[in-house]
Image (cartoon, rainbow, N blue to C red):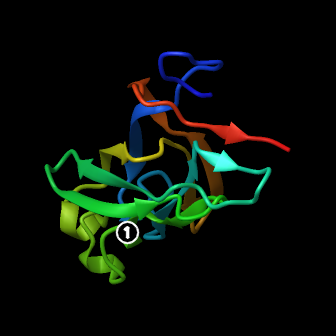
Amino acid sequence: MLGGPEAEYNGCPNFLILNHFFDGAEDPVTDDGAPILTILELVPCTTDFLRQIRARRSSSTWSTTSSSSASRPAGRSSASSSQLISNIDTTQNERSIFSAGVSGTLTGQTRINPIGSGVLAVAHEIHLSSGLADFNVHFQGDRADPDFIILP
């Protein structure tokens, strides 16, 4: 049991905080016009490995520093969910609130509020001219509701 009143382990985060480049932002270090993309991996906190049952459906609300927001299912199976942040709210990356063109800035902060099952996250920043950088997503608080990992 993760979190809750009879927790065996620390609970999953109440909020996730992602500091990131908006998709399509030009790399300010290399200044070669190559865009930066961010892929977010979400892993549900509730998983039944014993019966191989999918995690209970959860969703998340997403809000950026520009006061834009989106809602999207997250952690749709017992495996992680992986996608470009500009595909969270639309399939047209250039129209996303997570794109540099729409946000009007290179960087921002996104708060992710899990609804249903908690989620954990890691981000991959792709610099098309220089490589890949992985980083942890910050978090705030513990969820009041417990999550369960069932092992064989």
- 26 lies left or right of 134: left
Instruction: Examine the rendering and report whether any part of residue 26 can be seen.
Output: no
Residue at the image point whose x is 13% and y is 49% from the top = 67
Query: Quick one: quadrant of the N terminus?
Result: top right
Residue at the image point whose x is 53% and y is 25% from the top = 11
User: Residue 86: image x %, image y %?
Assistant: 37, 68
Residue at the image point whose x is 52% and y is 23% from the top = 3
User: Residue 14: image x %, image y %?
Assistant: 39, 31
**Residue hosting label 1:** 86
Q: Nearer the viewer, residue 56 or 101?
A: 56
Q: Residue placed farthest to the bottom in the image?
A: 92
Q: Is residue 85 above or below residue 18?
A: below
Instruction: Examine the rendering and report whether any part of residue 97 can be seen.
Output: yes
Query: Quick one: quadrant of the C terminus?
Result: top right
Query: Disc 1 marks which amino acid?
Result: Ser
- 56 lies left or right of 108: right
- How many neighbours does mark 1 have within 10 angstroms: few (below 14), some (14-19), or many (20 or more)? many
Q: Nearer the viewer, residue 13 or 95?
A: 13
Q: Residue placed farthest to the left in the image?
A: 67
